[in-house]
Amino acid sequence: MKVVVVGSGGREHAIAWALAKSPRISEVICVPGNGGTAGEPKCRNIDIPVSDSAAVVAACSSELAGDGDFVVIGPEDPLAAGLSDRLAGAGLRVVGPRQKPAALEASKDAAKRFMAKYGVACAKSETFSSANDAIAALRNGSGPVVVKADGLAAGKGVVVAADRVTAEAAVRDFMIEGTLGGAGRQVVLEEYLQGDEISILAAVSVTPEIAAAGRARIVPFLPARDHKRLRDGATGPNTGGMGAIAPVPGLDEATLARFRADILEPTLRGLVEERYDYRGFIFFGLMLTASGPKLLEYNVRLGDPETQAVFPLMDFDFAGMCEAVIDGTLADFPFAWKDGFCCSPVAVSGGYPGEYRKGVPLTIDGARASEAGAKVFVAGAKMDRRAPKGGNAGVGLVTAGGRVLAASARGTTLDEARERAYRALEACFFDGMFFRRDIGLPGAAASPAL
Ligand code: AMP
Ligand code: GLY
């Protein structure tokens, strides 16, 4: 069986790695993949940009001819643009929701409406399409507030404002200055919630037919925690994620039960009632508040870097799980997780999340990383075309993004996982390499004090 993975990040390297481990998969084709997937057994990259959906569909159609073959779509942009619909239209089997449900991530307003309609526990909010109305609402209130641009903004669309002056400035930036383009045409003003943040990734299998057979399911994976701030002690600017751990220590069964009752189940009910074709992954961004878990956001994909911390703990055949998602047999799928913890610190280019250099030579001593009991997932790095072919794995890589790689290691305890992951980072080098040293330590993911 062959499979195509669409995307080029660390998450897609982890997806490709997990698929390639399945004895039933003969080849994983990565479109376009990265320098990590290029060196992964059974994997092959095809250099087509994700944004060229016609070329992606053509490549998938010509590569996948076998009965069970399928495509996994990693990132949100192609999902929001309807790639899943186009691939399905070409007769391909797809893991990745259709365009309509992808609005749960692509529009904060659509997500909030869905949460309200189906009674999903979340922060109170109001959507505005006029800057004056939004500013008037801010002037009528007091205290911290969260300003969210409606559309996809690559992590730049949320401002947690300690006061109304900061909030008003964000509304002006998004709606009047247009700093985010069309993504900021509408804004959502949201109640500020306090607590610890966690991420729960889940597999989803919903279509009207699957629901009619009583088989619609959302199955959560182990809970994970991202670390968004650039520097140790949760300081410095927000980033795309400086490292993740799974599972989350100290998370009790009562909280998870409330998550299932107040968030997961109403979400499933909503996906079914809207008659969506949602076969793929969902990401619940949660705040654990004093009055229970509240949903901050849906993503219609797996998290990055959460995937790199969760996948090494899988004790099941990921390819088989993808088939269960497509076929509506998730209810019978034998999910199982390894004991212990996984820690996955991320190494970034110096200067990130601001300006940084690209094309910097990167070496990964894979043997040394394995000795430390870790797996290195590559994100922003590609093969240097000028480098000679062959030779040691990892030679010939150059950086190509802000977040360059993540070293994932398991341990019986979180401390052991941390120690192994950081030892593996010592086997990776590029000029300007920067990483946090406290991923997984208590308090390292604290929410910003206002
Ligand atoms: P989002 O993209 O909606 O998850 O927002 C990005 C980040 O902003 C989250 O990971 C939180 O740290 C923070 N955030 C979002 N909504 C809220 C809220 N209502 N209260 C406090 N912090 C929030
Ligand atoms: N780690 C957060 C995200 O994937 O959106």
Image: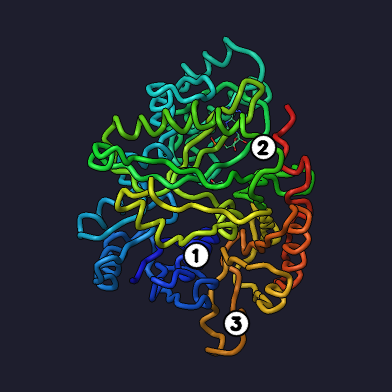
Which is more foreground, mark 2 or mark 3? 2
Q: Distance between the residues labelled 2 and 3?
A: 39 Å
Q: What element carries label 2?
A: loop
Amino acid type indicated by mark 2:
Leu
User: In which quadrant of the rendered image does the N terminus lie?
Assistant: bottom left
Quick check: can you spot residue 302? yes
Q: Name the residue under label 2.
A: 251
Q: Mark 1 points at which residue?
A: 18
Q: Quadrant of residue 347?
A: bottom right
Residue 50, percent across and down? 38, 61
Display colour scheme: rainbow
In the foreground, 95 or 359: 95
Q: How crowded is mark 2: few (under 14 residues within 10 Å), some or many (20 or more)?
A: few
| Numbered disc 3: secondary structure | loop
Q: Which of marks 2 and 1 is nearer the N terminus?
A: 1
In the image, is residue 203 above or below residue 179? below
Label 1 SS: helix
Q: Who comes first in sequence, dot 2 or dot 3?
A: 2
Q: What residue type is labelled 3?
A: Ala
- CB within 8 Å, label 1 to label 3: no
Question: Are circles 2 and 1 on residues that touch, CB within 8 Å?
Answer: no
Query: Which amino acid does the dot numbered 1 rest on?
Result: Ala
Q: Find ligand 1 in the image and state its quadrant.
A: top right
The residue beneath circle 3 is: 393
Residue at image x 58%, y 51%?
306
Q: Which residue is drawn at 68% across and 60% down?
A: 410
- In the image, residue 8 above or below residue 260: below
